[in-house]
Image (spheres, grey):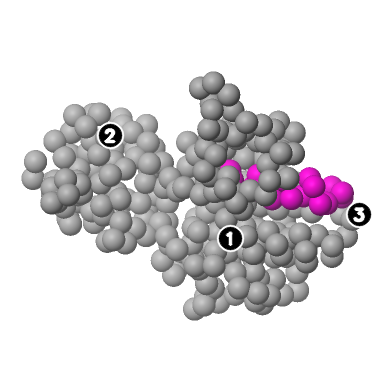
């Protein structure tokens, strides 16, 4: 198998040349730049599909998914590559800011609108929904999107391993989740009245956003690290158009807007306000 490289620890990864082909494909389809350090990850996530279609290696699999007759397999490959693990109340300072600073300052006569722009399996929007249900008596809405339809299907179910809820406060867990039994022992499920408050939809961040409504707060955490500077600039420009004047932008603490042309002011690490 010429296109496969077996390492000492028995992991399998594409060759350099084939990895570059995948890099270009992912960039053209999703706008995501996959650095060389992700070569092993790519191999791990796609190996079962390579074996499933009985391809001789990653090179043959690449050509297979690029054939017009195999679009379904291409979609599967892209979803496997973009699947990210997350958990409830990731980066707690964001949620502290919402409860202690933001919510008390809101106009109770206006609906507070939030968009989680890369929601993965749903832990982020459900965390926010729980906070708003407990601490905010005025109208609110949450929209949550991801490019990956598989993780969106998981998000809509709202079923999670206990270990993904370790940072979820006990009172919120009791109020808004039910414990799994029998085959679901070790899992929690978000209660229906919370699941129904989150509108999940598929969306690619490199696409135009002008059909979306305007929001008071946009979460776009742990996703821009996968884009190059040009694409990050494009996304920030588009995000700015979807925020209301003085709207807030939350990014990950591992990310920054440094080097980008933008109209945001920094309120505290990873929290920005759009200048009016």
Mark whose residue sits in front, 1 or 2 = 1
Q: Earlier in the sequence, mark 1 or mark 3?
A: 1
- The answer to whether residue 220 of the structure is visible from this angle is no
Residue 240 percent coordinates (x, y): 64, 65
Front residue of this view, candidates 150 and 186: 186
- The answer to whether residue 161 of the structure is visible from this angle is yes
Look at the image and give the residue range highlighted in magenta: 122-139
Taking the spot 23% from the left edge, 29% from the top edge, the residue there is 53
- Which residue has dot 3 on it? 109
Location of residue 106 (image quadrant): bottom right
Q: Return the mark for residue 207.
A: none
On-image quarter of the C terminus: bottom right
Q: Earlier in the sequence, mark 1 or mark 2?
A: 2
Q: Which element is circle 1 on?
A: loop
- Does residue 131 belong to the magenta stretch? yes
Q: Residue furthest left?
A: 2
Residue 140 percent coordinates (x, y): 79, 48
Residue 265 percent coordinates (x, y): 66, 77
- Which residue has dot 1 on it? 91
> Disc 2 versus disc 3: distance between alpha carbons?
52 Å
Taking the spot 49% from the left edge, 58% from the top edge, the residue there is 223
Q: Which element is circle 2 on?
A: helix
Q: Residue furthest top?
A: 182
> Disc 1 versus disc 2: distance between alpha carbons?
33 Å
Please give left or right for residue 93 compared with residue 39 in the image: right
- Which residue has dot 2 on it? 49
Q: Note whether 275 is above or below 144 in the view shown.
A: below
């Amino acid at each position: 198998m010429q296109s496969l490289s077996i390492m000492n620890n028995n992991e399998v990864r594409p060759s350099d040349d084939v990895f570059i082909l995948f890099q270009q494909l992912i960039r053209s389809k999703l706008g995501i730049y996959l650095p060389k350090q992700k070569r092993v990850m790519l191999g791990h996530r796609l190996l079962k599909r390579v074996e499933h279609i009985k391809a001789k290696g990653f090179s043959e699999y690449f050509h297979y998914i690029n054939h017009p007759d195999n679009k379904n397999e291409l979609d599967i490959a892209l979803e496997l590559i973009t699947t990210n693990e997350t958990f409830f109340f990731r980066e707690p300072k964001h949620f502290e800011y919402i409860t202690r600073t933001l919510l008390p300052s809101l106009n109770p006569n206006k609906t507070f609108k939030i968009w989680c722009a890369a929601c993965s399996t749903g832990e982020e929007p459900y965390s926010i929904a729980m906070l708003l249900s407990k601490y905010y008596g005025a109208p609110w809405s949450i929209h949550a999107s991801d490019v990956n339809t598989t993780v969106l299907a998981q998000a809509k179910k709202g079923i999670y391993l206990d270990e993904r809820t370790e940072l979820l406060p006990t009172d919120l867990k009791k109020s808004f989740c039910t414990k799994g039994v029998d085959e679901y022992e070790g899992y929690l499920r978000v209660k229906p009245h919370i699941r129904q408050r989150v509108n999940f939809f598929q969306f690619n961040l490199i696409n135009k956003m002008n059909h979306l409504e305007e929001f008071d707060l946009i979460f776009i955490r742990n996703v821009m690290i996968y884009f190059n500077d040009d694409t990050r600039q494009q996304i920030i420009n588009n995000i700015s158009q979807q925020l209301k004047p003085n709207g807030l932008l939350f990014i990950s603490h591992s990310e920054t807007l440094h080097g980008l042309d933008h109209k945001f002011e920094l309120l505290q690490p990873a929290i920005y306000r759009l200048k009016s």
